[in-house]
Image (cartoon, helix red, strand yellow):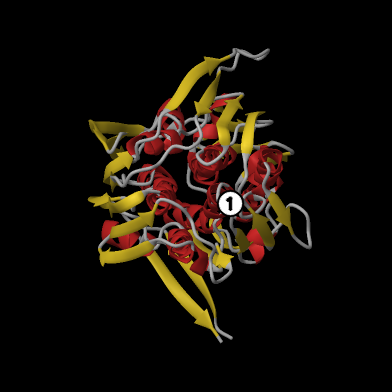
């Protein structure tokens, strides 16, 4: 068996203008809503990473005609419903894909077997399955709340469900189920989360009623979202903006590598997703946002990042939902900053593809960075200079852990190597190519 590693070498200035790959969250939703809708949906800029390709296969398995035309252009011809699949729906490593698909499938009188890879099988599904059960869906599996499982849908009834914790995935699953529930669905979120599903449902012809909710005892404002049942979705044209989570690796690489200036065009700047960029600017990053505009109902802009000094800050815990996937790369930026960067209210990171708090703490410490791990957070202390690097980092197959440490290696004193780099393709299949285009030195090695 051949094992591969990637090594990032301290690099000279990163220079250039690139476009980030399509946003993964919006790519999943475009495929799923297109499959649920009547007619042919045209999609431009779809992310063609492993996670999204699994969702495309699942939509075809559930009765849609899905066609790739090349270079991110796809069409999805839906029948206005899901049909019972002939095969098991395998979502690979994608938590977003499986949770949204379970919500959508629950609304139809069909039985669907869902599974995923070893990592996904360890991740909790109860947060979606429990409210779907309240609506009338039924799930069976050897390990409750875990994949693999069989979902029996149809006959759903209205529920008004208050999310125990902020979760765009749970909210989205319930809204998709509510399209085919008698009486629809109400979702009350304690604090506003990313609203891609609401925006895209509107683009596909659905009507939602969204009102403010709160503030709660901590001053947080939430939302109450009402969606009537029995609504038919109609095909749409979707332009997928650049993924802010992927763009973050390019931006931070420029911020920490001396002499660098990188422009990343067409990045999604939805308020529910742009928290990292606000945080970097508060850290003193030389980061500009140019050409703000709207594409397919989503705000986008072009980011220009230049190397410069960073300072440690306390990242507001209430900002966590808008940047939960970006804390690994924020921790890398913090390693180069002057002072302590405090990251709290991020317990959800422990139930992502891996325990990202533990893995980031271990990886940073191996690279000579001072880290204090907490149950729901971590504190990174930087000294305004490049950390040592010179480490082999175990990623446990987590793509964001791998990319974050490779970025660190570009600005460190000595190279940084990561194992299991194949998982990077789940979200950012062109990572190495774009980094090389900018001048980064990332090499691959294989051991038999």
Q: Picture coordinates of residue 380 (x, y %)?
A: 60, 38
Q: Picture coordinates of residue 383 (x, y %)?
A: 54, 38
Residue 124 visible in image: no
Q: Secondary structure at mark 1?
A: helix
Q: Residue at horizontal 57%, vertical 31%? A: 185
Of residues 367 and 161, the one nearer the viewer is 161
Q: Tell me if residue 122 comes above or below residue 251 in the rendering.
A: below
Residue 445 visible in image: yes
Of residues 126 and 387, the one nearer the viewer is 126
Q: Quadrant of the N terminus?
A: bottom right
Q: Tell me if residue 257 comes above or below residue 85 in the rendering.
A: above
Q: Tell me if residue 247 comes above or below residue 158 in the rendering.
A: below
Q: Residue at horizontal 38%, vertical 38%? A: 200
Q: Quadrant of the C terminus?
A: bottom right
- Residue that carries the numbered disc 1 in the rendered image: 102
Q: Tell me if residue 137 comes above or below residue 71 in the rendering.
A: above
Mark 1 Cα within 10 Å, few/some/many (few <14, many 20+)? many
**Quarter assignment of residue 201:** top left
**Quarter assignment of residue 396:** bottom right
Q: Is residue 107 left or right of residue 32?
A: right
Q: Is residue 86 left or right of residue 141?
A: left
Q: Residue at horizontal 71%, vertical 54%? A: 139
């Amino acid at each position: 068996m051949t094992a591969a590693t990637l090594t990032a070498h301290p690099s000279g200035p990163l220079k250039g203008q690139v476009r980030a790959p399509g946003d993964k969250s919006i790519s999943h939703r475009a495929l799923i809503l297109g499959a649920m809708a009547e007619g042919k949906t045209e999609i431009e800029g779809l992310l063609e990473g492993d996670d999204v390709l699994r969702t495309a296969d699942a939509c075809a398995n559930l009765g849609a005609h899905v066609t790739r035309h090349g270079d991110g252009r796809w069409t999805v011809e839906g029948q206005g419903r899901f049909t019972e699949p002939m095969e098991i729906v395998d979502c690979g490593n994608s938590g977003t894909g499986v949770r949204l698909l379970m919500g959508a499938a629950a609304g139809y009188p069909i039985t669907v077997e869902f599974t995923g890879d070893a990592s996904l099988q360890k991740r909790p599904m109860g947060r979606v399955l429990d409210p779907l059960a309240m609506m009338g869906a039924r799930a069976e599996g050897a390990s409750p709340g875990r994949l693999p499982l069989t979902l029996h849908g149809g006959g759903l009834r209205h529920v008004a469900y208050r999310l125990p914790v902020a979760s765009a995935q749970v909210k989205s699953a319930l809204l998709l189920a509510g399209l085919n529930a008698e009486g629809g669905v109400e979702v009350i979120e304690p604090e506003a989360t990313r609203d891609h599903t609401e925006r895209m449902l509107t683009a596909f012809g659905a009507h939602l009623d969204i009102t403010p909710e709160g503030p709660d005892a901590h001053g947080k404002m939430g939302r109450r979202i009402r969606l009537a049942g029995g609504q038919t979705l109609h095909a749409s044209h979707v332009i997928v903006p650049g993924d802010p989570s992927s763009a973050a690796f390019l931006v931070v690489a420029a911020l920490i590598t001396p002499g660098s200036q990188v422009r990343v065009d067409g990045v999604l700047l939805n308020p529910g997703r742009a928290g990292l960029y606000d945080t970097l600017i508060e850290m003193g990053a030389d980061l500009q946002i140019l050409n703000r505009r709207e594409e397919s109902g989503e705000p986008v802009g072009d980011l220009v990042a230049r190397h410069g000094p960073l300072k440690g800050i306390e990242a507001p815990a209430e900002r966590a939902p808008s940047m939960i996937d970006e804390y690994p790369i924020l921790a890398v930026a913090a390693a180069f900053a002057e002072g302590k960067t405090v990251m709290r209210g991020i317990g959800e990171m422990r139930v992502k593809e891996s325990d990202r708090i533990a893995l980031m703490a271990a990886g940073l410490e191996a690279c000579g960075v001072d880290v204090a791990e907490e149950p729901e957070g971590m504190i990174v202390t930087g000294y305004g200079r490049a950390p040592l690097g010179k480490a082999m980092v175990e990623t446990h197959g987590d793509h964001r852990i791998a990319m974050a440490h490779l970025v660190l290696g570009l600005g460190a004193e000595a190279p940084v190597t990561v194992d299991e780099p194949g998982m990077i393709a789940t979200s950012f299949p062109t990572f190495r190519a774009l980094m090389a285009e900018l001048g980064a030195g990332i090499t691959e090695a294989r051991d038999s």
